Image: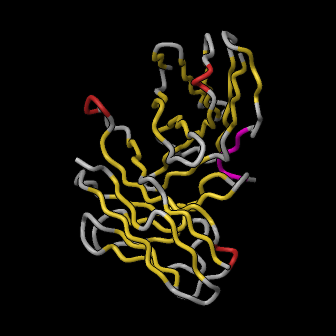
Amino acid sequence: NAGVTQTPKFQVLKTGQSMTLQCAQDMNHNSMYWYRQDPGMGLRLIYYSASEGTTDKGEVPNGYNVSRLNKREFSLRLESAAPSQTSVYFCASIGQGVMGRAYNEQFFGPGTRLTVL
Amino acid sequence: RKEVEQDPGPFNVPEGATVAFNCTYSNSASQSFFWYRQDCRKEPKLLMSVYSSGNEDGRFTAQLNRASQYISLLIRDSKLSDSATYLCSNNAGNMLTFGGGTRLMVKP
């Protein structure tokens, strides 16, 4: 049970290049999320997918697109990278809390550190 | 105003001290609340959920005050290993919102 996995772990892009960040979870969770984390800004929600086939904008969606490929996978695409998108990107999914409690515990992937030059 | 707010700190405390963090939230529809711990350059990991009746896990106690819309985390007998950033989070529907985190540094 790998939990939430993300690839790549590190990436350096030039301004204007495109790339896709991959995320997969093997916990059979319905909801998946993409966050970015910048120093002093905490975690900011980019997009989320409440279930397979649906996606919604979060707090900072501009410059990003997402695809919920299936229940396991949720990808984040930067079509034309900008230096302002230099950040650490975390993917997360939600499942039942421990002991069967109906509180939604969020599990995070290890993050992708992206630098845009 | 941010939806979830935390004092960024840092809180510098000696080993053995008791330290408390608060986190305020503005969405009264929030249904569940969490404290996460994040170590430097790592992903956040769930520390504890926050239940309406309050809950305790070893040295850690979490409280929820719905009337004043804040949650708190109390750490007793601080250890060097408690040094980290503590993030609070709330869940309204499918949206999870995080505070900016409070940095704790426990010194010998």
From the viewer's perspective, is B19 left or right of B52? right
Q: Looking at the image, what colour scheme do you see?
A: secondary structure
User: Residue A99 vs residue A41: left or right?
Assistant: left
Q: Give me the residue at 48% from left, 25% from top.
A: B52
What main secondary structure does the magenta stretch of the protein show? strand
x, y percent for residue A48: 44, 65
The residue positioned 43% from the left and 72% from the top of the image is A21
Q: What residue span does the magenta drawing correspond to?
A: B2-6
The quarter of the picture where the C terminus of chain A appears is: bottom right
Q: Residue at x 39, y 47 (%)?
A: A107
Pinpoint residue B58: horizontal percent, then vertical percent.
47, 13
User: Is A6 left or right of A99, judged from the image as shown?
Assistant: right
The mark total stands at 0
Q: Image quarter for residue B66?
A: top right
Residue drawn at x 45%, y 37% is B46
Query: Could you say where residue B37 lies in the image, as x and y percent from the top left?
Result: 54, 36
Q: Is residue B4 magenta?
A: yes
Give whichever of B82, A50 is nearer the camera.
B82
User: Who is closer to the viewer here, B50 or A42?
Assistant: A42
Q: Residue B53, relative to residue A14: is it above or below?
A: above
> What x and y, as percent, mark residue A111?
48, 57
User: In the picture, residue A44 is in which quadrant?
Assistant: bottom right
Residue A106 within the segment the image draws in magenta: no
